[in-house]
Amino acid sequence: MMKLEDVKKIAIIGGGNMGHGCAMVFAGAGYPVGLYSRRAETLEKAVVGMRDDLTFLAERGLGRLEDVEATVGLVKTTQDMEEAAADADFVLECVAEDMTLKQDIFQKLDQMCRPEAILATNTSVMSPTEIASTSERRERILGTHWWNPPFLIPLVEVVQTEETPQWVIDVTMDLHWKIGKHPVHAKKDVPGFIANRLQHALWREAISIVERGIADPATVDESLKFGPGLRLPVMAPLENADLVGLDLTYSIHSYVLRHLEDSHEPSALLKEKVDKGELGFKSGGVGFQTWTPEQQKALRANMLDYLCKAVREMREKDE
């Protein structure tokens, strides 16, 4: 049974955007990291990406430029999974969302890693219980769902499987607090875990409002940005319900819930757009709205600037 102080080395399996972003965060907290990818070019891009992201953060008051190279230097890249994982105490898998691939990787990790090492999957949608099902030591496998961009979004959903013991949860939660994340514990392994269930319930209603002709896409987004979205960072739904009173909440729900979207299938409007190739930014900017290249760039930049400001304020508040 391992404790937080026993965690000395981290391994990351998968060197894409999420993988190298997670590696960067662990290294930034002082942990040596083994970063594995099958492809040399992926690892080369990962090193460049970490250096660029750390510089980006430092230029915005989140870190120091003089620490960039030292942090990158704590990440050892390799095309040998066993080299990355063999002496690791905590292993995080960040590969594509393919169940067969993930199960195969965890079967290998289960054999490569020492018995007490914790093995985590960064899946955002797949069941950690199912991912672990073909491994021998299933009890030390769980989910840790980081959000993108991983070097800015604090949330990590720690998802226990049907066999996860409490000590694995405790060490995983403590480890993520230590590296500056905000872990939350999902006590049941259900599709979407916690935050994605909340997010896509909102998306389903937003798309439905457009599909039913109640408002256009821009108006839907404006209604959230200039209304409830402004208070969400300081007052989330259940806090809001307690504030206004559960009796009022019950009364509102008694009237409005029957009118909300409750389809168990994707929107017909969404399917139509996908079928037509109107995929948003990846299809030239045509999606629910039409975006020029300049607007696409501005939206991404505004999001990153907003997140940097929010993280700075969080850190200042904690100091």
Image (cartoon, rainbow, N blue to C red):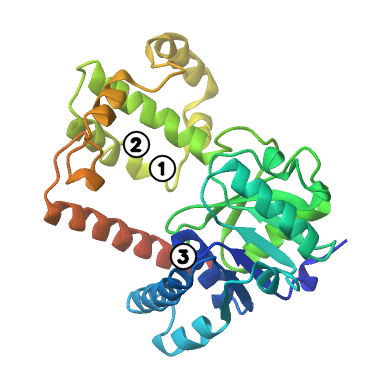
Q: Circle 1 sits in a helix, a strand or a loop, which is it?
A: loop
Q: Amino acid at mark 1?
A: Leu
Q: Which residue is mark 3?
A: 151
Name the N-terminal-most of marks 2 and 3: 3
Q: Which residue is mark 2?
A: 228
Query: Residue 118 is drawn in which quadrant?
Result: bottom right
Where is residue 271 shown, x and y percent of the image? 31, 24
Q: Circle 3 sits in a helix, a strand or a loop, which is it?
A: loop
Looking at the picture, does residue 17 appear above or below residue 250? below
Q: Residue farthest to the right?
A: 1
In this view of the protein, can residue 158 be seen by the observer? no
Q: Residue at x 23, y 41 (%)?
A: 280
Query: Residue 311 is drawn in which quadrant?
Result: bottom left
Q: Which residue is mark 1?
A: 232
Q: Amino acid at mark 2?
A: Pro
Q: Are marks 2 and 1 in contact (CB under 8 Å)?
A: yes
